[in-house]
Image (cartoon, rainbow, N blue to C red):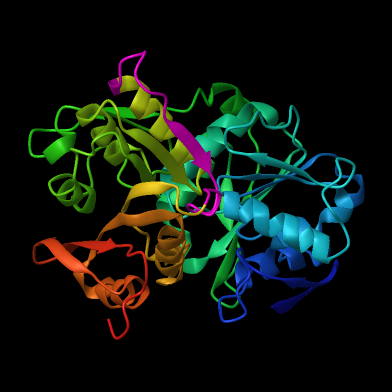
Amino acid sequence: MNRLTTPFGSYELTRFPADPRDRLRAWDAADEYLLQHLDAGTGERGPVDLAGAGQITVVGDRWGALTTALAAYHPVQITDSALTRAATEANLDRAGIGTAKSTVTLLTTRDEPPARIDVLLVRVPKILALLEDQLRRLAPRLHEGTVVVGTGMVKEIHTSTLDLFEKIVGPTRTSLAEKKARLIFCTPDPALLAAAGPSPWPLTYTVDQDGGSGAGLTVVNHAGIFCADRLDVGTRFFLQSIPTNTDGARVVDLGCGNGVVGTAVQVADPDAEVVFTDESYQAVASARATYEANVRPGRRTAEFLVGDGVAMLPPSSVDLILNNPPFHSHQATTDATALRMFAQSRKALRPGGELWVVANRHMGYHTHLRRLFGNCEVTASEPRFVVLRAVKREARQPGR
């Protein structure tokens, strides 16, 4: 746990789930820079009168640092991450603030945004499509007097980022860099706001014939899903390897993204009981749309869960878990998420149940799986990717 000191107070903050071994902080210099600007101003831009500003909306807060620091001004947080939401709730509770409606409102990217926004604070997301989707959805809620400030690390803010603000909201410029962070200042143009138009998302495409068990499926991607207009190479390789003759098993598409893997299983085995789970609200919405585009009404109904992997599933309740784990947490490269998914999977699997993982070969997940499950085999490989299979035994075998 680390303490963030801001002009608005000092707070002990953690990511979610909290792990004392995790060296990654729940904020970075971009969060600090924005909070300092709101209090004291930056360059030619003066401080923002938050007390008299009206409705404040925080978009893309990573772990709740901005929302917690500004809680006294009753902000609305909009996030695509269930983990961010959980971290925000925990950090607010730790600060003695809580999430009562009179204090902070927590919304997801799938919720209706506030009707009028007077201060818009945007933590620039990693995926540009998500930024465009957010700005287009929020544009009708902005007005000529709305204060719009974005923030991000220098490596996260590109010309294309600024072009989106300029195109959808209004004239845009950046601050000087501090601690490798930068601010974005945007002045709303009523004409642009009125002409912003709806978001172009979701996008839809059909998997080609080289897509293994996914060939011919219709895939629906809401904004923010990795590789939006085609099948990414890792998933393509996985679809050529996964078991689809599941004999009515309970199957989890863990970290489901657009849900093409779980949908492929359901189409191949109508008796399968498929669960789609992801920490992204956009991903689970995409998975539901992909499923509904391919599975005839009347077949077994799938489950769609937003949360921390399979932590919400009962122990020993699953036969097969299919997983393409991420190895980034925002800009940080880490295997922490994957290892948590593996540990959760072992708990959720029934004895004899299997975890199948596709991963970049260099991640070395076979070592972790062998330590956790006592076994691991490579079922498919190519120069860049491997597909690994681990089986939950009834009892751990000594020395294995």
Instruction: Say above or below: 201 vs 363.
Output: above
Report x, y in % for residue 195.
Answer: 54, 22
As for residue 306 lying within the magenta part, the answer is: yes
Q: Observer-nearest residue: 254 or 174?
A: 254
Residue 149 visible? The answer is: yes
Chain part drawn in magenta: 294-314
Instruction: Say above or below: 94 vs 159.
Output: below
The answer to whether 317 appears left or right of 186 in the picture is: left
Q: What residue is rendered at 36% in x and 64% in y?
A: 394
Q: Quadrant of residue 57?
A: top right
Q: Residue furthest front?
A: 394
Q: Quadrant of residue 218?
A: top left
Report x, y in % for residue 293.
Answer: 32, 21
The answer to whether 229 appears left or right of 298 in the picture is: left
Report x, y in % for residue 288.
Answer: 42, 29
Q: What residue is rendered at 31% in x and 77% in y?
A: 397
As for residue 214 lying within the magenta part, the answer is: no
Report x, y in % for residue 159.
Answer: 42, 54
Residue 285 visible? The answer is: no
Q: What residue is rendered at 27% in x and 63% in y?
A: 390
Q: The C terminus is located in which quarter?
A: bottom left
Q: The N terminus is located in which quarter?
A: bottom right
Q: Observer-nearest residue: 179 or 334?
A: 334
The answer to whether 142 appears left or right of 299 in the picture is: right
